[in-house]
Amino acid sequence: MAHPTGKYADFEGLREQAVTLRREGLSRRQIRDRLHVDNNDILNRLLQGEPAPDWTRRPNAKDGLRARARELRLQGWTYDQIQVELGCSKSSISLWVRDLPKPERRPPSEQARLAGRMRWEHELAVRDEQRRRTKAAAQEIGPLSDRDLFLAGVALYWAEGAKDKPYDRRENVLFVNSDPGVIKLYLAWLDLLGVEPDRLRYRVMIHMTADVEGAKRYWADLVGVDVSVFQKTTIKKHNPTTVRKNVVDTYRGCLVVRVSQGADLYRRIEGWWTGMVSGITTPPSSGKV
């Protein structure tokens, strides 16, 4: 479209055309070419107040944070709370949400309490991430050799298994634990020692208010036997003066594993443990791993 002498004389008519094209989704370059406007100042005036279409905007790394900040502001969050949650500066937050209504002011004590809670939740999230990274040390172990498993099993039994006492002679191989990983390692150790599966006796020990049948099925699946082979469950009675913390859905009590005719095996375990202690040559303070 050509313009006569006094190229932009009909400014209002030209602006009407520019606005129409803008609202149809055209970019500045497209409008400039369509209307043959080669003066940027004139083009700016023609498009004044008309936002650019979304497709012409460059992606911004903070777009997601901006959207989240606006969402939290609409929920009544303060700048301090949003800053703790998103880790953004207050100046950025102010720029993003300045057109939104201000939240209702709370008493200073309540604001302080909420800010403190937000800081604590942020700290917990940081700690959880640090904990997750530290637990990646599992990759440092790798496959266990037979000797690794043998020594681990001896130490595990001596720490967690039933032991003979001079005043109470019970040379039984009896192991009780609530950790599935511990149970798996213990059974792998017994298998390494050549203990036949038919010598193993299983029993669940659990609190009376828990899902007893569900716990029995869980442990039976874990050790690979039918629940019918389990011996009578030991039920722990409720003590009304005790505040129990093991009340979550994942509470499945403890699994008791006994090796029948285990006196000879128990004596060997005690001997192995004595040998391990005697075999220590590195001073405890050396700090070597």
Image (cartoon, rainbow, N blue to C red):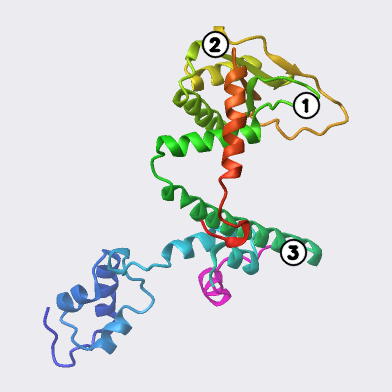
- Determine whether, in the image, residue 152 is placed left or right of residue 158: left
Decide which of 11, 141 is in the foreground and name it. Answer: 141
- Quadrant in which the N terminus is drawn: bottom left
The residue that disc 3 covers is: 111
Decide which of 74, 8 is in the foreground and name it. Answer: 74
Give the image location of residue 42, x and y in percent.
27, 87
Among the 4 quarters of the image, the one containing residue 97: bottom right
Single out the mark in the foreground, 3 or 2.
Answer: 2
Q: Is residue 164 above or below residue 54?
A: above
Range covered by the magenta-colored residues: 89-103
- Distance from disc 3 to disc 1, alpha carbons, whole Å, reads 63 Å
Single out the mark in the foreground, 2 or 1.
Answer: 1
**Kind of residue at badge 3:** Gln
The residue that disc 2 covers is: 227
Of the numbered discs in the image, which one, if any, rests on residue 166?
A: 1
- Determine whether, in the image, residue 134 is placed left or right of residue 62: right
10 Å crowding of disc 1: few (<14), some (14-19), many (20+): few
